[in-house]
Amino acid sequence: MTSTAGFASSSVTAQSWEPHVEDGRATGEVHWLVQSEDGTMSGLWRIGLEEGAEFPYKPEASDTFHAIEGEAELETPDGEKIELVAGGIYSFPAGFTATWRTRSPFLKFFVVA
């Protein structure tokens, strides 16, 4: 990751991914583009079926993302099911809660603010 004068760029390599841990549980891998002091974060996140077929999804800040590949489902506490598919753009507010179910290896570009 390179960041100067408000500009950030990054190159994705096999070595540039790091484990993503949420509530003490590994939930895929992340490649960071931006991690700023104000809490804004962006980058790539990926997960396979083996490491995260199902886990709680509860963003602490607004989570907006473009699904690049794969399929997943979010199920809210009231039973509503939201299908996440490659090519879709989604935005969930802080405090949103659901169960994430990975249907196939999933890759997204995200912005958390």
Image (cartoon, rainbow, N blue to C red):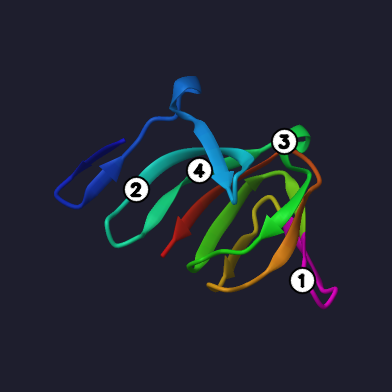
Task: Name the residue carrying label 1.
Answer: 76
Q: Is residue 82 magenta?
A: yes
Residue 41 relative to residue 104: left or right:
left
Mark closer to the observer (4, 1):
1
Cβ–Cβ below 8 Å for labels 2 and 3?
Answer: no
**Residue 79, above or below 112:** below
Tell which circle, 1 or 3, labels the residue nearer the N-terminal end: 3
Q: Quadrant of the C terminus?
A: bottom left
For the residues bearing labels 3 and 4, Cβ distance under 8 angstroms: no
Identify the amino acid type marked 4.
Leu
Residue 81 drawn above or below residue 51: below
- Residue 42 got which mark? none
Alpha carbon separation for disc pair 1 and 2: 29 Å
Quickly name the residue at label 4.
Answer: 44
Q: Which mark is residue 51?
A: 3
Sooner in the amino-acid sequence: mark 2 or mark 3: 2
Inter-mark Cα distance, 2 to 4: 10 Å
Q: Is residue 75 above or below residue 16?
A: below
Element at label 1: loop
Q: Exactly how many numbered labels are in the figure?
A: 4
Disc 3 or disc 4, which is closer to the eye? 3
Q: Residue at x 62, y 72 (%)?
A: 96
